[in-house]
Amino acid sequence: MFNPVNTKNPRAVEAVAVAIYKELFPLGDAEVVRQAFGWAAQCFEGRFEGYQAIDSVYHDFEHTLQGTLCLVRLLRGRHHANATPAISQRMFELALVAILFHDTGYLKVIGDNEGTGAKYTAIHVARSGTFAENFLTLQGWAKSDIEPVRHMIRCTGVNVNVAAIPFSSAEEKIAGFALATADLLGQMAAENYIERLPDLYAEFDEAARFDAGSSPRVFRFESAEDMMGKSQGFWQFYVVPKITNEFEGVCNYLNDPYPGGPNEYMDRIERNLGRLKQRLKSAE
């Protein structure tokens, strides 16, 4: 069972990531991990020149930290399962940066004062990839390291065709699948997931109001209750098939112990959905 971590506290999640990095790569430089978290905090807190602090009510920094925590735990489980291809130290570092930047597409530039970053929901994945490329280029990163980050971010798109992503290797592809899996599981397993669903609806509602026929289109719901009522179907018919089939079941590396132990993330999601079902039933 995983120890509880306060995902509202970036330093708490960073400490777990550093510990796992040191465990998997004892010869590595953990400052790389700390630097990645520092970069993400700089961007989400409005300290990156030309950009405002994140103002999306659901896709905030905590959302990113939830996915990040899940990702490092998943990669740790996969490492100890001796799965192939192995995720190298550098690919671990690139995946960490990718998930920390995967929702930077919700950030608004200075002077963009209409609405919140939620208006970019339909195009936030592409915006995130561009933001990450620009930011990392400023840090002096080589294109050969930036491209894998962009490819992994693309994996998080709701309607992404992963077969169209030009991964440079099987290792990069698996890292991308792990990242996208963690993005989904990290948020849905959170203790406050049910309580935050109205915030998610508010983002979809805003995105729909700003949507002018963009592609991909955004989800549309009649109300927060309508969206919450469809959460079980989203899990059963979208998330589970996607993570088990399209993302090649890397979620199983969260089983503790692997391979037959319980999967705390999957179990928490089932409990959350059960709690949501009871709440909706009581409201009838």
Image (cartoon, rainbow, N blue to C red):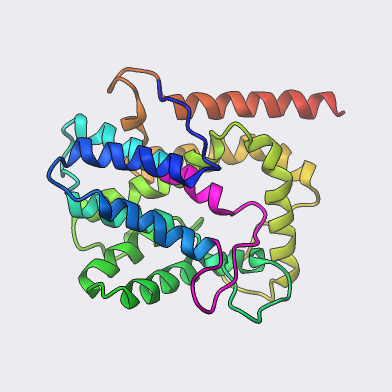
Q: Position of residue 145 (x, y in %)?
A: 24, 67
The quarter of the picture where the N terminus appears is top left
Residue 194 drawn at (x, y percent): 67, 35
Image quadrant holding the C terminus, namely top right
Query: Which residue appears at 33% of the width and 71% of the height?
Result: 136
Q: Is residue 283 left or right of residue 14?
A: right
Who's the residue at 33% across and 22% down the image?
Answer: 256
- Provide the residue span drawn in magenta: 45-68
Q: Residue at x 69, y 65 (%)?
A: 207
Against 109, is 64 above or below? Answer: above
For residue 220, say whether it is visible. no
Residue closest to the eye, 198 or 85: 198
Residue sitting farthest toward the bottom:
111
- In the rendered image, residue 55 lying in the magenta stretch gets the answer yes
User: What secondary structure do most residues of the magenta stretch adopt?
Assistant: loop
Looking at the image, which residue sits at the far left? Answer: 27
